[in-house]
Image (cartoon, rainbow, N blue to C red):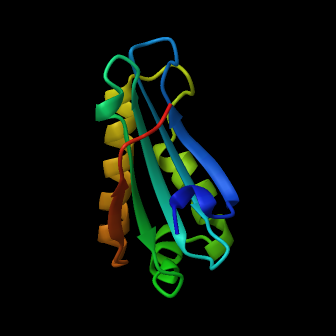
Amino acid sequence: MSIFEKTKVLCELIAESEDDSPVSATVEVFFDEDMNLNILFEHRDYDNPEYSCFSYAIVANNDCFRIASFGDVSLSGIPSMLRKKFGLELCCCKASEAEAAFYDILEYVKISGARYKLAEELPYKN
């Protein structure tokens, strides 16, 4: 199933770069309908669409409790906690800063003891 066919629950926008630049990026964190945590990085290159892609990590629902425990929040509080911890000022960050936030969240997930599966969808169609 594509990441875009999933129902987003408790979605938090972590970073969104300026849309008027040739390259933009967005990071979102949300639960899907199976209560797996999804961390989505969208990279759009308007000048070279073949370089655009979506990378995402999925933390299985039975591993999310590790993140909640590590962050001292409830399971439903994970997206909000990640937003507070890693969120950037929206529409004011660079695409590289959004990408760095994505990888910072993945590092936090690893430190918490949770595991994730990393995937990518190519190519992005404008």
Q: Is residue 61 left or right of residue 34?
A: left
Q: Is residue 10 above or below residue 50?
A: below
Q: Is residue 70 above or below residue 118?
A: below
Can the viewer see residue 107 in this picture? yes
Q: Position of residue 107 (x, y in %)?
A: 30, 59
Q: Position of residue 48 (x, y in %)?
A: 31, 22
Q: How many marks?
A: 0
- For the residue pair 71 and 61, the one nearer the viewer reads as 61
Q: Quadrant of residue 5?
A: bottom right
Q: Position of residue 94 (x, y in %)?
A: 39, 22
Q: Is residue 77 above or below residue 105?
A: below
Please name the residue shown 52% across and 18% down the image.
19
- In the image, farthest residue toward the bottom: 62
Q: Position of residue 88 (x, y in %)?
A: 50, 33
Q: Is residue 103 left or right of residue 81?
A: left
Q: Is residue 98 above or below residue 35?
A: above
Q: Quadrant of residue 80?
A: bottom right
Please name the residue shown 58% across and 55% down the image.
4
Can the viewer see residue 74 in this picture? no
Q: Quadrant of residue 105?
A: bottom left
- For the residue pair 90 and 81, the one nearer the viewer reads as 90
Please name the residue shown 45% across and 80% down the image.
66
Please name the residue shown 67% across and 60% down the image.
8
